[in-house]
């Protein structure tokens, strides 16, 4: 039980699931999907940007502005997050289906081995795309994302360890919604092992369809993609927040992220961003952009 409590607190308190404010941009590409919306900007080599749980393409606003004129940007938003209606994401699994739509977009738009950058849940989407279509992706960056998020808190964690608390979190979001979570979060403390404040007080929910949020949260907590890493042939860069303060959980990020990606056939490049927490591109935009430029060079 104690291990489950620690996994939950770490996962939701800052290692995996922060959301970011803002609504998706409205100018969409000609691509039609019930799962994702895609906005295209500028010109140059292709770069796809995928946001995390409960986030929209707005999290990439500053990054996109700095890359304008240098890259043709494809900004993905997931239906059911922010202001987008749930549509196809109202039923069934989400992460694998979203990854399938990103692959379809790459094919239908005729993109030639684009680069992918995915944040948090978007990093898991990007990993699936690169594993399922290794010949279609040029390079991949994950931003504070892991193929199995619980391993960033407890390297020996299993899906079985985290599934019971993921199920409770799913039910809380599904039944209570955003307003209910704020009102009932403290009352849920005992059921969640005292971690309710970390779950419902610091996640920064920005709204969206409660079924989509609940399902996506459940999947981010339980999906384990480590067995898919050997299928990825594109070069991978792993970006994450880091702290030199030994009292901070971020001081252990180097070891945890390197362990998480150990099964890649080609060793990843690791970029730790000092002073950043989960929202790396917002917490330390200058250092993050330096890492992006090295990735794209």
Image (cartoon, grey):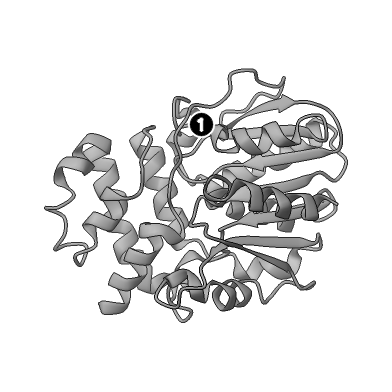
Residue 143 at what x, y percent from top left? 60, 55
Q: Is residue 24 above or below residue 158?
A: above
Residue 239 at what x, y percent from top left? 64, 60
Label 1 belongs to which residue? 79
**68 and 284: which is toward the camera:** 284
Res 71 quadrant in image: top right
Residue at the image point whose x is 31% and y is 57% from the top: 167
Q: Regarding mark 1 in the picture, which secondary structure is present there?
A: loop
Crowd rating for badge 1 (residues with CA inside 10 Å; few <14, some 14–19, many 20+): many
Residue at the image point whose x is 43% and y is 53% from the top: 17
Residue 191 at what x, y percent from top left? 17, 62
Q: Is residue 85 above or below residue 262?
A: above
Q: Is residue 178 above or below residue 171?
A: above
**164 and 192: which is toward the camera:** 192
Residue 190 at what x, y percent from top left? 14, 63
Report the side of 14 relative to 58 (left or right).
left
Report the side of 288 relative to 292 (left or right).
left
Res 180 quadrant in image: top left
Q: Residue furthest left?
A: 187
Of the 4 image quadrants, the one containing the N terminus is bottom left
**16 and 33: which is toward the camera:** 16
**45 and 35: which is toward the camera:** 45
Residue at the image point whose x is 66% and y is 33% from the top: 75
Residue at the image point whose x is 38% and y is 35% from the top: 206
């Amino acid at each position: 039980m104690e291990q489950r409590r620690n996994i939950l607190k770490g996962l939701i308190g800052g290692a995996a699931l922060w959301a970011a404010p803002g609504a998706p941009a409205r100018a969409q590409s000609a691509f039609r999907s019930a799962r994702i919306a895609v906005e295209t900007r500028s010109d140059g080599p292709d770069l796809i940007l995928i946001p995390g749980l409960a986030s929209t393409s707005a999290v990439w606003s500053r990054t996109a502005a700095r890359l304008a004129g240098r890259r043709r940007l494809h900004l993905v938003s997931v239906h059911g997050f922010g202001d987008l209606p749930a549509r196809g994401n109202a039923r069934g699994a989400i992460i694998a289906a979203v990854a399938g739509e990103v692959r379809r977009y790459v094919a239908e738009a005729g993109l030639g081995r684009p680069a992918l950058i995915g944040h948090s849940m978007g990093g898991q989407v990007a990993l699936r795309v690169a594993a399922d279509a290794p010949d279609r992706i040029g390079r991949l960056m994950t931003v504070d994302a892991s193929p199995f998020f619980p391993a960033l808190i407890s390297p020996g964690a299993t899906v079985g360890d985290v599934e019971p608390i993921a199920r409770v979190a799913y039910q809380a979001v599904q039944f209570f919604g955003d307003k209910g979570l704020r009102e009932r979060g403290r009352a849920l403390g005992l059921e969640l092992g005292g971690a309710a404040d970390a779950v419902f007080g610091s996640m920064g929910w920005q709204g969206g369809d409660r079924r989509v949020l609940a399902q996506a949260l459940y999947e981010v907590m339980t999906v384990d993609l480590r067995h898919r890493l050997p299928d990825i042939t594109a070069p991978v860069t792993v970006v994450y927040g880091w702290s030199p303060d030994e009292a901070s959980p971020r001081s252990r990020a180097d070891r945890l992220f390197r362990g998480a990606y150990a099964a890649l056939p080609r060793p990843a490049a690791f970029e730790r961003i000092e002073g950043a927490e989960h929202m790396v591109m917002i917490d330390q935009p200058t250092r993050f952009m330096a890492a992006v430029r090295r990735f794209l060079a």
